[in-house]
Image: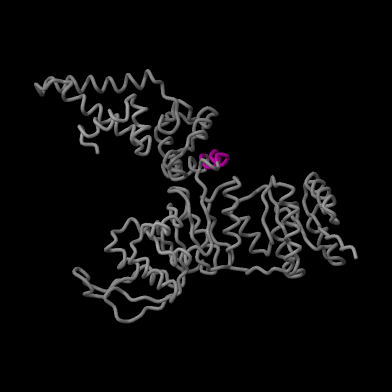
Amino acid sequence: MAKTPLNVWVVDDDQSVRWVLEKALRQADMDARSFERAEHLLDAIEHETPDVLITDVRMPGMSGIDLLERLRDTSPGLPIIVITAHSDLENAVAAYKGGAFEYLPKPFDIDEAIELVTRAARQNGHDRDEGVAQSADISSMIGQAPAMQEVFRSIGRLAGSSMTVLITGESGTGKELVARALHEHSPRADKTFVALNTSAIASELLESELFGHEKGAFTGADSRRIGRFEQADGGTLFLDEIGDMSPALQTRLLRVLAESEFYRVGGQTPIKVDVRVIAATNQDLARAVKESRFREDLYHRLNVIRINTPPLRQRRDDIPTLLRHYLAEAAEELGATAKTLDEEALAALQSFSWPGNVRQLVNATRRLTVTAPGSVISAADVPSDLGGSESPKRATKEWTGVLAAWAERQLHSSDAPLLETALPEFEKTLIETAMSQTNGHRQEAAKLLGWGRNTLARKMKALHLD
């Protein structure tokens, strides 16, 4: 007996999108019906219900998010796929909270859309928690790149949940922003969010910082201290750089996660807490487990859900948007008019590697707002350490001028031969720069300096750089 084809409806005010989806759905042996407005679909759904619905977000009249709200009451089992050209964190979270099965940003791959329809039909009726109302806009979560859209989807899927999350990614990629977004869109949004960078606190003090201490627990403990776990009771505790935590503290943290209770340092009474833990690291924790630097049981306890924050070099299309946003923010901080970038300056900044990621970009916009003389930032205003193309002749003139001034001062203040004083410092500076550029790889550093590896090793030993 032949299977009844899936009945899929499409709501989108863009005729071309409706046409493409209808054609693709029919080629996949599905029945397709499209509507230009959400109101027209609501009229039709009173008489017939589709197996799957695909809806745009921004449409004349009723929006896709409003349509989700209506259908959640009238057709609670209907799987809905939300598509939109205006893909940001707030739309993603709103879509999932409204009951959407999946969120798909435009432009989308048509095969991916068809696969989603098939999966939605297979899991028909899958419920999602309503969660809490949306709270403050997290404007710094900006991104149209696929890697950022996956981050938005993950936050949206977890709306309404208090699951433990592990956020991974390089320094400066916005791991704390993701943690705050997870908190702001969770049932704990009206409770405390406490953030702690575990690597910024000495290991001998971190235990007291996390769990608190009783009066007299150790020298200098003049009064009882409430730790971060107690401060975050009912809310969320964000532990950044978790990979740097000592083995002893890893054991205590595991016990808290397993039993939801702990003892203050020097305390005898167990403290019961209800805390959602979100951890973050720029390290490879799986590798740290293999090397016995991180507890395997703690790793699995933290790694319930993982979100990876992409480095800026993997989302270059987002750089212009980020630059505009943070240039405006920097201007507001300084009480000035926001500066713009000309094409050459934008191209230089977009092609830059950004090793410090978004954090470095934010600092760069503040720097350019202060240093660029005009209202439009040109390529000449972009420093060489941000990808600017500084004139080699000008750069050489600058440092040789500084050297000449130093030599004149040295001749007036000392009888020591100039080269005996200057040459070791000159070589030391160049060696340190080359080693930094190659992340400590001597063979590569020697090539940059025009030396052999043995020469570099000999020089480093003589200059006490080992």
* Name of the residue lying farthest toward the front: 454
User: For residue 318: magenta?
Assistant: yes
Q: Nearer the viewer, residue 124 or 451?
A: 451
Provide the major secondary structure of the magenta segment: helix
Taking the spot 16% from the left edge, 25% from the top edge, the residue there is 421
* Name of the residue lying farthest toward the right: 1
Taking the spot 58% from the left edge, 64% from the top edge, the residue there is 159
User: For residue 106: magenta?
Assistant: no
Would you place residue 180 above or below residue 174 in this image?
A: below
> What span is colored magenta in the figure?
316-323
- Residue 184 left/right relative to 95: left
Q: Position of residue 129 (x, y in %)?
A: 63, 69
Q: Position of residue 233 (x, y in %)?
A: 43, 72
Indicate the quadrant where residue 242 lies: bottom left
Q: Position of residue 286 (x, y in %)?
A: 46, 57
* Name of the residue lying farthest toward the bottom: 269
Q: Position of residue 194 (x, y in %)?
A: 41, 64
Indicate the quadrant where residue 464 lies: top left
Count of labels in the image:
0
- Residue 120 left/right relative to 289: right
Q: Nearer the viewer, residue 363 or 358?
A: 358
- Residue 93 left/right relative to 222: right
Q: Quadrant of the C terminus?
A: top left
* Name of the residue lying farthest toward the left: 415
Q: Quadrant of the N terminus?
A: bottom right
Q: Which color scheme is applied?
A: one colour
Q: Nearer the viewer, residue 292 or 176?
A: 292
Would you place residue 401 above or below residue 306 in this image?
A: above
Taking the spot 39% from the left edge, 20% from the top edge, the residue there is 392
